[in-house]
Amino acid sequence: MALRSNPTLRQRRLGAELRRMREQAGLGGSQLARKLGISPGQMTQMETAKIGVSPERLRTVASACNCANQPLIDALAGIASERGKGWWEEYRGTLTIDFLEVAELESHAARLTICTTTYMPGLLQTSEYASAVFARIFPPLSLQDIEARTAFRIKRQEVVRSVPLRVFVHEAALRMQFGGPKVLADQLDALLDASERPGISVRVVPFAVDTFPGSGENLTFAEGPVPELDTIQMDVTQGALFFDSPADLTKHRAIFSRLDSTSLPEEGSRDFIRSVMKDVKATYA
């Protein structure tokens, strides 16, 4: 069997969950391999997603590890049975891997919760605003790269339109100008429209909040079919980082719970966005 050279985000997560299952059973890789009747090398390749795992083999591994979490086993079996390529694969070679993996994460999420502090959530950006965000990157991108990234972002919005979306936007992101006041005003107007759509919740975290409960980064919490398969994605200068350890999931659930309790309610958030939009429009009226 040929080894995978570039396992996908989902394939790597499946391997990581197999390793986690083995470690929770107190088994070493060689011990579990012996119980399964495979080589230690094959066990390592399964856990690093270098080779695939069938749903049947996955259930055998779960049984050998005495895992009784049936919802988790069924969810992992679902990942193991996935075939075919996602829509984002057409951009492979055009965009960096982190773009593709963010789209992969979103496309399989049961619900998305986003916190942004420096710019509007990508899934709610206008094309003009998105282009302005990419245009500010240093060293500067070529026009072709900006257009490709913008088109990809708009496609992401179309694909996840049916996924429940909860957004916390810091006031700093509402006021940060990308593309000038006209682009920002149009973006704020689009954000208001989005906040009225079914399945989308937009909440504002104003400067007046005594203590901002977030960590400062732009975060996405993607819920999986079971809580154990939730994932955190963090935007950093170098691209996207992904976290899925139980400790990280617990920490960020607490962060979003605090955001929920400190941010403005939905209607109050719309009023706040309107007031910011009025201020912005006054600068070019």
Image (spheres, grey):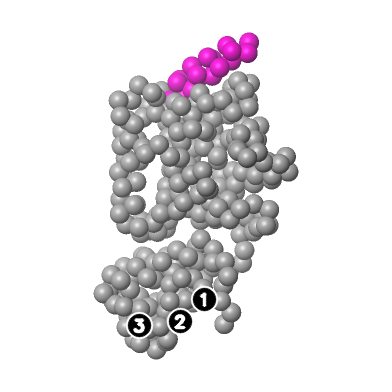
Label 2, label 3: how many angstroms apart (C-alpha)?
Answer: 10 Å
For badge 2, the amino acid type reads Gln
Q: Residues within 10 Å of mark 1 (few under 14, many from 20)?
A: many
Q: Circle 2 sits in a helix, a strand or a loop, which is it?
A: helix
Residue hosting label 3: 30
N-terminal of the two: label 1 or label 3? Answer: 3
For badge 3, the amino acid type reads Ser
| Callout 2 touching callout 1 (CB < 8 Å) | yes
Label 2, label 1: how many angstroms apart (C-alpha)?
Answer: 8 Å
The disc at residue 42 is 2
- Residue 15 counted in the magenta span: no
- Quick one: which residue is furthest to the right in this view? 144
Placement of 180 over or under 23, stated as above or below: above
Of circles 1 and 3, which is in front?
Answer: 3
Residue hosting label 1: 51
Q: Residue at x 56, y 17 (%)?
A: 280
For badge 1, the amino acid type reads Ile
N-terminal of the two: label 2 or label 3? Answer: 3
Q: Nearer the viewer, residue 186 or 40?
A: 40
Asked which quadrant contains residue 134, the reply is top right
Q: Which residues make up the magenta segment?
A: 269-285
